[in-house]
Amino acid sequence: MIQQLTILSNRKIAKGATELVCRLPERQEIAPGRFMHLKVGPLLRRPISIADAGDDEITFLFKEVGKGTGELSGLQPGMTLDALGPLGNGFPVDSVDEADHVLLVGGGIGVPPLYYAMRKLVERGVRCSAVLGFDTGESVFYEDAFRALGPTTVTTVDGTAGTKGFVTAAIETEGVDVLFACGPEAMLRSVQHLDIKERYISIENRMGCGIGACFACVCASPSGYVKTCTDGPVFRAEEVIL
């Protein structure tokens, strides 16, 4: 479904991180972990994960890395944005047992969809904790928002904020029943085989069409290949080979 979103705010919230808040044309339920394929000028659409959604608003958080995301960061309140979606399969928030303890692990720009997932889990009464990894203190975002939902550990590679080191060094799995993770492939490989009963990982991948037609975002699986855009981006950890 193509929707016309109205820009409400567009601001840089940390080094390399821009938060874009839009009004949806109508109220709709959007599962955490899904994404929108945003059109910027004549360029190919850009897949951007959903950092939050509620009522008639939706929030994206992205890193400016090229011409497309550069144009996104320049949109002003009142402008409209062509969005295809929401697309893909998200985190199974509604199927998590309320007695479970969910650990959310995010790295860099993989953090945004985990905020939305954690918020929805907490609304259901599920106990959650989060470990968030960034390069440096200037890159940290949403720390207070996560802490308002549950215990949160922040790591930075250079040690300028939180615990020094990679996000994986701060993970404690004792008592954890479910893992939700999103971030760079190296991080996902590190958490893919953790000793946790249920493990779900969200894969970041380059996309063309976003609807499964172009095969630009395929990922290896034990049975062949899967499409990140339509089979994912969220998979059970054992469903993909990284």
Image: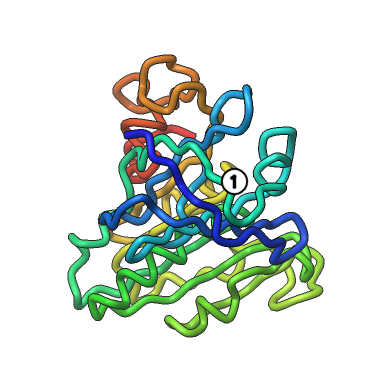
Display colour scheme? rainbow
167 vs 2: above or below: below
What residue appears at the point 20 percent right and 62 percent down from the top-left corner?
94
The total number of labels drawn is: 1
Locate residue 206: give its quadrant: top right
Question: For mark 1, what is the residue?
Answer: 184
138 vs 197: above or below: below
**Relative to 73, is 117 on the left or the right?**
left
Q: Which of 189 and 146 is in front in this view?
A: 146
What residue appears at the point 38 percent right and 72 percent down from the top-left corner?
119
Q: Position of residue 37 (x, y in %)?
A: 47, 36
**Relative to 162, is 198 on the left or the right?**
left
Q: Which of 168 and 44 is in front in this view?
A: 44
**Relative to 94, is 64 on the left or the right?**
right
Locate residue 103: give its quadrant: bottom left
What residue appears at the point 35 percent right and 56 percent down from the top-left corner?
32
Density class for disc 1 (Cα within 10 Å; few <14, some 14-19, many ≥20) is some
Locate residue 8: give its quadrant: bottom right
> Residue pushed farthest top?
214
Q: Position of residue 185 (x, y in %)?
A: 57, 42
234 vs 2: above or below: below
Amino acid type, label 1: Pro
What residue appears at the point 70 percent right and 78 percent down from the top-left corner?
162
Q: Where is residue 22 in the image (x, y as percent from the top left)?
A: 49, 56
129 vs 89: above or below: below
Badge 1 element: loop
Q: Position of residue 146 (x, y in %)?
A: 50, 76
Q: Quadrant of the N terminus?
A: top left
